[in-house]
Image (tube, helix red, strand yellow):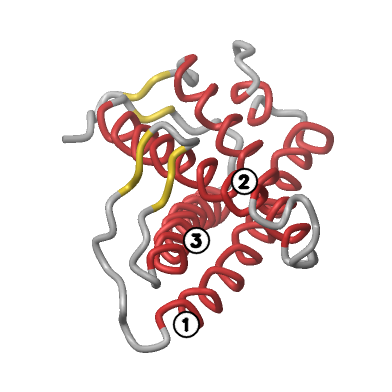
Amino acid sequence: MAHTKQAAGYDRLTITLHWLVALMVIGLFALGLWMTGLSYYDSWYRTAPDLHKSFGSLLLLLMLLRLIWRVRQPRTAPIATHQRWELILAKAVQGLLYLGLFTVLISGYLISTADGRPISFFGLFDWPVLISGLPNQADIAGTVHLYAAWSVIVLAALHALAAIKHHLIDRDATLSRMLGKSN
């Protein structure tokens, strides 16, 4: 159950998870684009997808932790100078980012398990195959994965640009709070 109390700023775990997720999303996107251009004879042909799947699995765990933590923590109070439309737009983009990230992660899982093989997590253990063998599973999940990944990157760029706008033009504490600085 979510708290109704509001916090003045973000706690360290929220800030850490935010930036870890941001770095992982950018890294996984770059790795995903790069590995699609690898040939069968490239030395990274098998290694890159394994790393992509492992880090994608780690991102799923971080997103689940982030979601649980977000529900359990008091909401951070909005900055008084923010307009109502900015708050609505920020909430919508944040919701779409969560939806997009979970869509990317689930579709990635469906691509990887389409042939019935589990996903290795850095060689430590295997994620079980829960769904496989659906008609065109890998192709459909691959298309969803691609479009959802691009959508997340575009939304994340807009999110970052909005934070920079608040910092440089509005000169408010929006970005500073997510950097762990007090208001």
CA separation, marks 1 and 2?
21 Å
Image coordinates of residue 137 in percent, x first then y, are 40, 80
CA separation, marks 2 and 3?
10 Å
Image coordinates of residue 37 in percent, x first then y, are 80, 66
Q: Residue furthest left?
A: 1
CA separation, marks 3 and 1?
12 Å
Nearest the eye: 130 or 47: 47
Nearest the eye: 55 or 22: 55
Q: Which mark is residue 104?
A: 3
Nearest the eye: 20 or 121: 121
In this picture, residue 26 sits left or right of residue 2: right
**Which structural element holds mark 3?**
helix
The amino acid type, in three-letter code, at marker 2 is Val
| Residue with the mark numbered 2 | 25
Badge 1: how crowded within 10 Å, few (<14), some, or many (20+)?
Answer: some
| Residue with the mark numbered 1 | 140
Residue in the image at 60% along x and 25% along y: 178
